Amino acid sequence: MGEENSSEEIMMDPRAYIIEERLRGVRRIIAVAGGKGGVGKSLIASSLALILKDTGMRTGLFDLDFTSPSTHLILGVRDLVPKEEKGLIPPDFLGMKYMSLVYFTGDSPLPLRGEGISNVILELFAITRWGELDFLILDIPPGIS
């Protein structure tokens, strides 16, 4: 017979509730992920976001690639910053909402591993206000499951 966890033993990250609220207006989330870098995930994520936007869908693109963020290069994003208002509001770019780690890191990769990556991703989801979207496309860093 296995042991049962009491509610006191299970601690839920308080950001989970905030993230759920922040994503309430997002109808569908598509994560573009893969086991290694340099295979075209960012190109696929960027292209998918543009195609969905061009078909009239309210679309957001979230570049979460810590190792080599590149959607800003693919799309030609320059001089954009999120608006700060009870969190971060992604700027509109090419008719879609766009958020990237490059707003915080420039073109430098973040030297994070394991739990550090998870914490940054959770924090970014907790502070980003997407509003109403039909699709949110995520460009996931390599090796994240």
Image: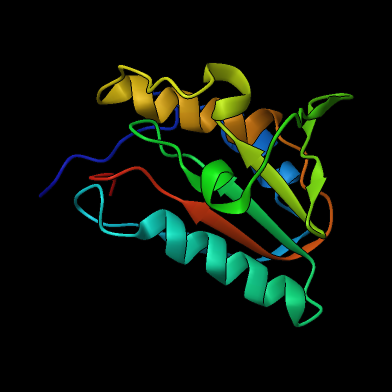
Q: Can residue 76 be seen in this view?
A: yes
Viewed as shown, does residue 4 lie left or right of 135? left
Number of numbered callouts drawn: 0
Q: Which of 50 and 119 is in front in this view?
A: 50
Query: Residue 117, how many percent across, how many down?
Result: 36, 27
Does residue 27 lie above or below 139 as drawn?
A: below
Foreground residue, 122 or 139?
139
**67 left or right of 72?**
left
> Residue 97, how many percent across, how many down?
76, 51
Name the image colouring.
rainbow
Write down the quadrant of residue 106 in the picture. top right
Residue drawn at x 45%, y 60% as measured from the top left:
43
Is residue 108 toward the left or the right of residue 3 in the image? Answer: right
Q: What residue sits 80% from the left and 40% below the top? A: 91
Considering every residue shown, the one lying at the far left of the view is: 1
21, above or below 48, in the image: above
Q: Which residue is drawn at 26% across and 58% down?
A: 39
Q: Which residue lies most toward the bottom here? A: 55
- Given residues 54 and 33, the one toward you in this image is 54
From the viewer's perspective, is 14 left or right of 121? right
- Quarter-of-image position of residue 46: bottom right
